[in-house]
Amino acid sequence: MSLADGYSAKRLSIARMPAQRVQTDGPLASMLDQYRGGTRGPHWHSDWAWENYEPLTLALAQHFGLKRLLEVGGGRDPGFLEIGRKAGLEVIVNDIDPRELALLPPGTPTAQFDVAGDLRGRPDLVEAFDLMTARMVFEHIHDVEQAWKNIHRMLRPGGIGMAFFPTLYSWPFLINKLLPPETAKAIVERFFPNRAADGDNPVFPALYDWCYGSETKLKRMLDPIGYSEMALLPFWGHRYLDRVPVARELDHLANRASSALDIRALTTYAVVILRK
């Protein structure tokens, strides 16, 4: 049972929660409103984001007629390879590290490049994709502004770029940012064995460049790039205290209050969706 299932709708009313709002009034906003209206809440909690990110991505592809999907930073364990193919999409897996891509099943379509790098020498990437998606990748990118510029260049007109990432200044990620990388890595591997170097989701250094849940902050960086529509879905809550009952409940109450007051400095995760 998820945390979202453990609380009654009466206690966790979502009627005025900020995750119900989007940044634009165009086709993207309308589609997101329709999608959320058909899902179970609480919509402010990060459980919703984890449960719905992949279905939402596929729903966006279907709604806007997007066919060619690039999973940014998919590495050895992409999330869309199988479900994307079943949905009729052409799925290409990207990673900066060719060693990660080498761990994929033989014959998997791949594209090895740094999404935040200098791609002027890659004309093959210009308007090459309909949909570019990144889950738990942007916190590791050294220049997120350049990444969004590159994504804009790689998207076809009407294409969508989206990213799901942890945000500052939620305490788990603030601590992770402040700790020495090796210490942070050891702590994560201690609590999540699958994050070990030989697991299916190894730990990489986290930088948190432009990882915020605030439209105001992100628009300063994104507006000049030229996207036609933007939606930001903020979320609060996490699973790091699941084994500590009292602390877990106190932390949940703090996150619930932060969401009700729309305190964007304390979001835990955000999903940013941009349409070219």
Image: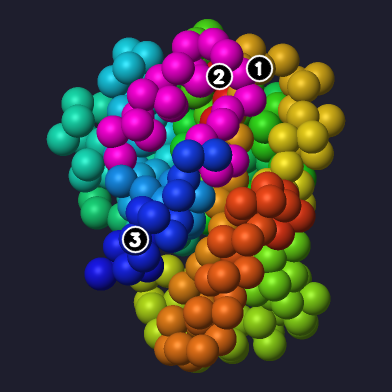
Amino acid type, mark 2: Arg
- Give the Cα distance between marks 1 and 2: 6 Å
**What residue is at 48 percent from the left and 32 percent from the top?**
132
Q: Give whichever of discs 2 and 3 has the lower sequence position.
A: 3
- The image shows residue 178 at horizontal and vertical percentages of 80, 76
| Above or below, comparing residue 127 to residue 11 in the picture | above
In the rendered view of the protein, which quadrant contains the N terminus? bottom left
Q: Is residue 120 visible to us here? A: yes
Q: Is residue 113 visible to us here? A: no
In the rendered view of the protein, which quadrant contains the C terminus? top right
Query: Does the stretch in magenta take in 33?
Result: yes
Give 250 or 30, whichever is nearer the viewer. 250
Outermost residue, left side? 86
Way the structure is coloured: rainbow
Give neighbour class at mark 2: few <14, some 14-19, many 20+ (Cα, 10 Å). Answer: many
**What residue is at 54 percent from the left and 11 percent from the top?**
26
Q: Which mark is residue 275?
A: 2
Q: Give whichever of discs 1 and 2 has the lower sequence position.
A: 1
- The image shows residue 241 at horizontal and vertical percentages of 51, 82
Boundaries of the magenta span: 17-39
- Give the Cα distance between marks 1 and 3: 39 Å
Query: What residue is disc 3 on?
Result: 8
Secondary structure of residue under mark 1: loop
| Above or below, comparing residue 74 to residue 153 in the picture | below
Amino acid type, mark 1: Tyr
- The image shows residue 238 at horizontal and vertical percentages of 51, 68
Give neighbour class at mark 1: few <14, some 14-19, many 20+ (Cα, 10 Å). Answer: some
Q: Is there CB contact under 8 Å for labels 1 and 3?
A: no
| Above or below, comparing residue 275 to residue 134 in the picture | above
Give 87 or 244, whichever is nearer the viewer. 244
Amino acid type, mark 3: Ser
- Give the Cα distance between marks 2 and 3: 35 Å
